[in-house]
Image (cartoon, rainbow, N blue to C red):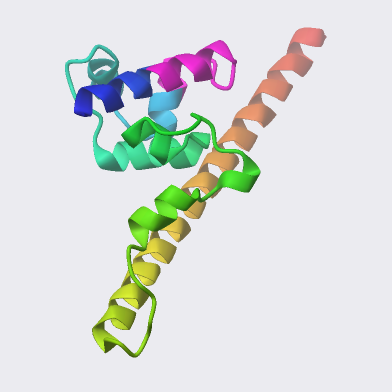
Amino acid sequence: MKTDINQRFIVAVQYLISEKIEPKKSEISKNLEISPSKFSEILNKRMSLGMEDASRFCQVYNISTDWLLLGRGEMLITEEKHLSSSVIQDVFPYNLEFGKKKSDAFDLLRLLERTIERHEKTIEFQQDTIIKLNLKLEATEKELKVLRR
């Protein structure tokens, strides 16, 4: 299973490079906050991709968690498929008849709170990435102006 996940991760990284979504593997490791040596070890199949890194990878690059972790569906998430029904079924295996058991409702609320917290962290990470990319863009534009002179 882990080797399958790693193999799909490698395929996705190669896709990002070949489609010029990222110019280099080092940019991907930087965006995922994975050290270059650890990233290299994963790509060379000497280390397994951790779940936190897999989650961050999927969030940053719109890669389907179903595809990366389970090999189901398409690699890329389209706008209308942000949460596939299979993911929802995996996360919410409850029969939502509130009142049947109060603890079920509280468990669901705790799960929703944790999900919201994870999404907020993702948004913060993406905002930081946008700021870094904007700074990089400004620096590149300044270099371009100098070169044009």
Say whether residue 37 is magenta: no
Establish if 23 lies above or below 133: above
Magenta stretch: dominant secondary structure: helix
Residue at 30%, 87% in the rendered image? 100
Q: Provide residue 124's location: percent of width, then percent of height.
A: 49, 53
Q: Quadrant of residue 105?
A: bottom left
Q: Choose between 104 and 118: the one closer to the eye.
A: 104
Residue at 59%, 34% in the rendered image? 133
The quarter of the rendered structure image containing the N terminus is top left
In this rendering, position of residue 102 left or right of residue 21: left
Q: Provide residue 135's location: percent of width, then percent of height.
A: 61, 35
Establish if 79 lies above or below 15: below
Q: Choose between 129 and 18: the one closer to the eye.
A: 18
Q: Quadrant of residue 92?
A: bottom left
Q: Choose between 94 and 24: the one closer to the eye.
A: 94
Say whether residue 12 is magenta: yes
Residue at 49%, 29% in the rendered image? 75
Tell which residue pokes out farthest to the right in this image.
149
Residue at 33%, 69% in the rendered image? 94
Q: Quadrant of residue 32?
A: top left
In this rendering, position of residue 65 left or right of residue 6: right
The region drawn magenta spans 11-27
